């Protein structure tokens, strides 16, 4: 029985090889800028979801769908390059961001190039024409929704009255739908029925939302060594996370924490949030979403791949613990 | 017999109606930003080429392909929004640019939304699945090439040794390939054979190159009232146009003209360039490209639409005269 860890490791190797084949030796500033973040690594979780979803629908030769798996990784990377410009972030995956190494115009174009390649690679998969058209449509709608999610996220930074429902809509669009599309596109290209494809989409969206909520918890609770990120950076930046929203609802004012914080101050803040039961409540939302994700898989026949998909949902909320 | 002028006017009305239906009443900053430039007008030449190419291949109900025609207009507008950010341009089509009305992050996302919609609308056309996949592939490759063209254009601004061949490659990518894709996609969705699709692509690319060269001539020679642009702006900005390249080859130094110029100074410069035969030589390149474009159409059966396509190539090099 393959463990999820082994599966993901093999998947990363396989996707990395394909990425190096297509993007490892490109010429010119623009194409090197496009390849920069892709070549900096990453867990390749979206490609894993594409392939697992396909294999959960029909046991086949998943090599046929490697181009589609790559397409979802390219889509993810295009959004990262553009988001980094908008957010003014200087580093990601341990390397300087594209607009930092080159410049903003090159980074805009580098993202645009990956965007095009994503659609091209969907078409290069070995699948039926009608299925590919369904996949292209889904990818296109997903990209528009991701833009909407990023736009909401930026608008939230200028507000202090974001509701839990608004937050969940934003996270669903910014993070959820790309996992939804990964699972559904994998299924569709493998011949999923509409019911199966809808279930896979639901699985992916909810897994992605759970992933993002867990990410917010990691930002607050995980040690810096473990997460590789500055602890409590969301609170220092006044981000409207589920943690911040629930704190506000319970009368805890996070505004005084929008500044450089010492380790002791962060520990005190965490203790206050724990005492108010906030971390636990936020955690419960992530667990619930992972549960909805796994429940959605029930329309699929039992298989090793179905089990691994369910384990991915659990893994998403176990990270950083 | 329909004149090209009448045809283009009817086409503009038709495409404008569709644009208003889809983008006239959208909500939220992001979608209004996406619609801004689209609703500001435009000649809708690429949609006209899509429909004419389709009807030159098979006389059919061209309403089937309106979504694909719109897709090419959306692609054009997405590139304009991103280009305006990169070039720092404040106005286009008589309205402030998207990043000027909103901000750069919103403009990046607004372009990204239209990019997605372009692929979605290709899929919404009423055509065979295999043809749609060919069209999606072509659009994807075209978008990557347009990015390359814009990247070359920006790099050329930092050089003063650009060759004619490099200029023609840049223009072919930045302007030509989208006309090539418009013609080829129209043909493909209407059931063109590979030979016909290739011919239509060749027609479009060469028409587009001719269009751009004529644009450079208009910038220099046309009166401001006629072109709506500042005369000789390319020379003031030191742009590497075919005019600048040929001037350099003939020993005319344009560097002293990279500053604010009086009308008399521009008139003197034009006279110098005319005396050296430069405007005439540049004009000859545009005429030659339009000729190659029209020649490419010879594989198609004679029809009203074939005649109108040929007239478009002539119209592209007649503008501003």
Image: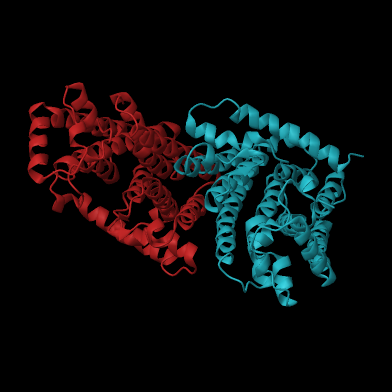
Chain colours: A red, B cyan
Whether residue B160 sits left or right of residue A139 in the image: it is right
Q: Is residue A55 above or below residue A198?
A: below
A14 relative to A205, above or below: below
Q: How far across and down, in percent of the image, does residue A248 sit?
A: 21, 25
**A87 and B178: which is toward the camera:** A87
Instruction: Examine the rendering and report whether any part of residue A201 can be seen.
Output: no
Visible residue check, residue B197: yes
Relative to B147, B279 lies left or right: right
Residue B54 is left or right of residue A8, and the answer is right
Which of the 4 image quarters holds residue A90? bottom left
- Viewer-nearest residue: A34 or B286: B286
Horizontal and vertical percent position of residue B297: 81, 56
Measured as percent of width and height from the top left, residue A292 is found at: 27, 30
Residue B314 sits above or below residue A203 on the image: below
Identify which residue is drawn at 37% across, 47% down: A50
Instruction: Measuring from the top left, give residue A71's x and y in whole percent.
Output: 44, 51
Total marks in image: 0
Where's the N terminus of chain B, which quadrant? top right
Depth order, front residue of A114/A57: A114
- Which residue is depicted at the point 42% across and 52% down? A74
Q: Is residue B73 left or right of residue A147?
A: right
Residue drawn at point x = 54 percent, y = 27 percent: B26
Residue B236 sits in quarter: bottom right
């Amino acid at each position: 029985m393959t463990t999820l860890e082994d599966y993901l490791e093999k998947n990363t190797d396989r996707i990395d090889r394909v990425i190096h084949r297509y993007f490892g030796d490109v010429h010119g500033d623009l194409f090197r800028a496009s390849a920069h973040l892709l070549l900096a690594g990453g867990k390749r979780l979206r490609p894993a979801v594409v392939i697992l979803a396909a294999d959960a629908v029909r046991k086949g030769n998943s090599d046929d769908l490697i181009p589609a798996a790559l397409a979802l990784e390219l889509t993810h990377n295009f959004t990262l390059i553009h988001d980094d410009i908008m957010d003014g972030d200087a580093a990601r995956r341990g390397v300087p961001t594209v607009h930092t190494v080159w410049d903003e115009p090159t980074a805009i174009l580098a993202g645009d190039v990956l965007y095009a390649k994503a659609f091209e690679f969907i078409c290069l998969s070995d699948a039926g024409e009608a299925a590919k058209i369904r996949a292209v449509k889904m990818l296109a709608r997903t990209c528009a929704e991701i833009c909407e999610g990023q736009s909401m996220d930026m608008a939230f930074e200028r507000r202090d009255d974001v509701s839990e429902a608004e937050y969940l809509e934003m996270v669903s669009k910014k993070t959820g739908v790309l996992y939804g599309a990964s699972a559904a596109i994998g299924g569709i290209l493998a011949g999923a029925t509409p019911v199966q494809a809808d279930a896979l989409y639901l699985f992916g969206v909810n897994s992605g939302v759970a992933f993002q909520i867990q990410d917010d918890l990691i930002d607050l609770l995980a040690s810096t060594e473990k997460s590789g990120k500055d602890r409590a950076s969301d609170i220092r930046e006044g981000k409207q996370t589920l943690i911040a929203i629930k704190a506000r609802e319970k009368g805890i004012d996070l505004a005084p924490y929008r500044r450089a914080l010492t380790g002791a101050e962060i520990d005190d803040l965490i203790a206050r949030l724990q005492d108010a039961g906030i971390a636990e409540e936020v955690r419960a939302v992530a667990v619930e979403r992972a549960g909805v994700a796994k429940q959605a898989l029930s329309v699929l026949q039992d298989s090793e791949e179905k089990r691994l998909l369910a384990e991915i949902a659990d893994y998403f909320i176990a990270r950083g613990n």
